[in-house]
Image (cartoon, rainbow, N blue to C red):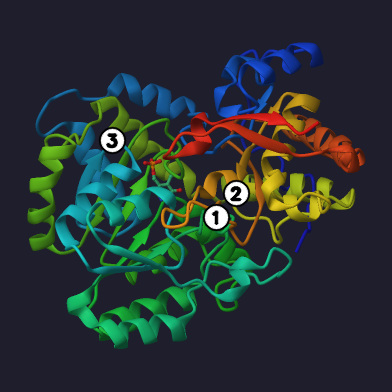
Amino acid sequence: MTGYTPVPDAEPFRIKMVEPIRWTTREEREGLLEEAGYNLFLVPAEAVYIDLLTDSGTSAMSDAQWAGLMRGDEAYAGSRSFYRLREVIRGLLGFEHVLPTHQGRGAEHVLFSTILKPGQLVLNNMHFDTTLAHVQHRGGIAQDLAIAQAYDPTSAHPFKGDFDLSRLERALKEHGPAKIALVMATVTCNSGGGQPVSLANLRQAAALARSHGVRFFLDACRFAENAYFIHEREPGWTGRPVREVVRAMMDVADGCTMSGKKDALVNIGGFLAMRDPALYRQATVWAVLFEGFPTYGGLAGRDLEAMARGLEEVVDEEYLRHRLGQVRYLADRLRDAGVPLMEPPGGHAVYLDARRFLPHLDAEQLPGQTLAVEIYREGGVRTVEIGTVLAGRDPATGANRHPELELVRLAIPRRVYTDRHLEWVAASVIRVYGRRTAMRGMTMTEEPPVLRHFTARFRPIA
Ligand SMILES: *Cc1c(COP(=O)(O)O)cnc(C)c1O
């Protein structure tokens, strides 16, 4: 599964513009941590040497995209840049109707306002946070139906984002089209570690949905990374052109939501796309209300232009080979040093398994948070906890939820860092691993009632 070979994975681009990043001393970081209440969201980005908080909206744009910003048409209605974006989406994904939105959650807001009635279900391999929140905001019920291996950090299953098809079929049979608003496949499966969904599984899941009269959509944020995994791994599809794989993935769906901040290689933007003209007309009403006129959707013309160009660039196979190779490279460095990871590495991030990294801490001692803080202290590298802090409390009992996985995510921005940067990241994590037994955990000192991870404050346990 590793197979990193340095030459073919080398960067298929060179660097034309540079942005200085600042190194901080250990003493500075110590002070910054204290000021931030040991919450990395509250540390200023300028005090971060390598920022692996997220891959969302952090991509470096190409010269063609920057040039496109100047070519953006800022007409309120019928902008040339909109038509160009729609042509790219029609050509690449095959969806006829396109509504731009300010980002991915804008597309979710419009879609669920259009199709979801209170009390209805949405079935997904694994809902992303904003998708889940939008389903619940509309009074819907979200169900995750990924295979069991998705929750096992040691399973090397090649498509851990796959649906459990028998559970999907059972849910469809039990509830039927009156009770189920949508089946949605998240590619790659972000909440499951950026794990891909196979084409065979997508096809069967879509066929099941269709045979029960339920629409099938993709949450397509990382569609190109998913397609490249299929191109690498799936029997019958290995070596097939990525554009062909992308089209085969889309062909089974009635439409998609998309965050341009991921696989459209832009810093802001998104869209909702679909085949059904009647659904498009209904969705347009909500799009106008929430996002803006249907040819700009909360974006400037230049943003539409940059997104159109990014969608063309993201399916370049040299780019994708480098992209997934870089994530794998970091995973290989860490694994070689014995650092416990969620396996296999996903498309956009490496996940440290905090439970196995710090086995002497129990969940109430917040091992994920402890580890993320320690990695920043050690190397100025910002990561994010995906564990007990993020999971929040059970509203009924008030007790901390204990998720199945306690992780620290190292998300790799697209085209931003070199392998030398990742060497530094690996060295920092490995040094922390060397002194892991000395870590005592953290406790929360201030806890907001909702989305606590963003603003909570902590202190180290003495
Ligand atoms: C990021 C993301 C979204 C939401 O997109 P935003 O642009 O952040 O609003 C939805 N689904 C998945 C899988 C994502 O990764």
Identity, as a three-letter code, of the amino acid under mark 3: His
Image location of residue 173, percent across then percent down:
30, 88
Q: Which residue is mark 2?
A: 388
Question: Compared with residue 386, is residue 277 higher up or lower down, i.e. above or below?
Answer: below
| Residue at figure coordinates x 57%, y 65% from the top left | 231
Q: Which residue is mark 1?
A: 401
Kind of element beneath mark 3: loop
Identity, as a three-letter code, of the amino acid under mark 1: Arg
> Left or right of 256: which side holds 288?
left
Kind of element beneath mark 1: loop
Q: Which residue is mark 3?
A: 102
- In the rendered view of the protein, which quadrant contains the C terminus? top right
Residue 289 seen by the camera: yes
Q: Nearer the viewer, mark 1 or mark 3?
A: 1
Q: Are marks 1 and 2 in contact (CB under 8 Å)?
A: yes
| Residue at figure coordinates x 56%, y 37% from the top left | 414
Image location of residue 254, percent across then percent down:
25, 67
First in sequence, mark 1 or 2: give its number.
2
Q: Is mark 2 within 8 Å of ligand 1?
A: no
Question: Compared with residue 434, is residue 243 higher up or lower down, i.e. above or below?
Answer: below
Q: Nearer the viewer, residue 117 or 449?
A: 449
